[in-house]
Amino acid sequence: MTDVATPKAARAGGAGGLLRRRRAPHGSLESQQERFGYALVAPAVIVLIAITAFPLVYNVWNSFHHVNYLNPPVGSFAGLSNYKTLFTDNLFVPSLVRTLLFTAVSVAIELVAGLALALALDKPFRGRGVVRAAIFIPWAVPTVVSAELWKTMFDPRQGFVNYTLTALHLPLGHTTWLDQVWTAWTAVFVADAWKNVPFMAIILLAGLQVIPRDMYEAARIDGAGAWQAFWRLTIPLLKPALMVALVFRTLSAFLIFDIIYIMTGGGPGNSTNVLAYLNYTAFISNSDFGYGGAVSVMLVVIAMLIAAAYVRVFRTDYEVTQ
């Protein structure tokens, strides 16, 4: 049988085992087509670089300079003073902790709920197509609109949440949700989950759809129960979809801004202040582009570390097969 060598195996085999891309002879038709392809994608690449690389580089430059328009002179070199301020003031570290905790809790809740919803939608039932289309609705609603919706629903006087709790004679029926720390976070988690559980469900449902059904039949014949089939078959085969869902959702949760801005404004006090909202405050409210640039750089660095950690955890090591 033919050996199928993977990149890992090829590296282990030394220089002779490396898989090299065959270069087309210069001037050949294939070479001309290749250059033409590069020319076609070049404008899009240039635009992407312009709208992503320039702001990033500009923020890095700001982070090493004094760029506070309320406290001139502007543009003087500040070294690492902006980064030192991050860890010496009373805003950045608490905001970082809140952001990490929010990310961990919200992603965990949405993963469990999204997986349960995906498993339910994977089963055949009447009207399944309509239900699948309907769960897109919360995710399709702009975040600002959904945040305003939930802010109104948590209104203590005329909100639907208090009205329902009071009508059912349940506790918390007269709660001022957004004026207390834990209730404000509860409202934020509910609004965020309503918006993003469908996103998790759709990605995981797509992953479930590509798992061959005969594998479940074979597992049943071998004596595996539903729980064993779920842990030994569904979860391993769902790893690629899980990685996509977790990477996108974790980064989105880590950069949360819209819901905090609309529903709580970082309050009460600074109890719901997260990194993205702190960055907004530094740039817009305080006009401190140096400090804001340092916060932006830290956001990018931490987001890249999170993405790299996910890729490492979910990476599949292929073996040489005979």
Image (cartoon, grey):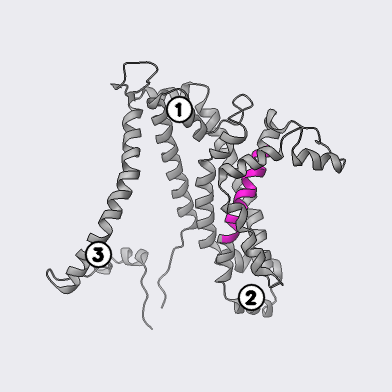
Magenta-drawn segment: 186-202
Give amino acid for label 1: Ile
Tell me the quarter of the image containing the C terminus.
bottom left
Badge 1: how crowded within 10 Å, few (<14), some, or many (20+)?
A: few
* Res. 105 in view: no
Q: Mark 2 points at which residue?
A: 216
Q: Which of marks 2 and 3 is in front?
A: 3
- Does 235 sit left or right of 182 as displayed? left
Distance Cα–Cα, label 2 vs label 3: 44 Å
Find residue 276 and report its horizontal and vertical position in percent.
Answer: 50, 35
Find residue 181 and report its horizontal and vertical position in percent.
Answer: 67, 30
Tell me the quarter of the image containing the N terminus.
bottom left
Q: What element carries label 1?
A: helix
Asked if the stretch drawn in magenta spans residue 168, the answer is: no
**Circles 2 and 1 in contact, beta carbons < 8 Å:** no
Quadrant for residue 10, please give it: bottom left
Which residue occupies 63% across, 79% down? 218
Distance Cα–Cα, label 2 vs label 1: 55 Å
Which residue occupies 54% across, 33% down? 274
Q: Mark 3 points at which residue?
A: 37
Badge 3: how crowded within 10 Å, few (<14), some, or many (20+)?
A: few
Q: Residue 284 carries which label?
A: 1
Find residue 42 and report its horizontal and vertical position in percent.
Answer: 25, 56
Which residue occupies 29% across, 22% down? 75
Q: Residue 6 carries which label?
A: none
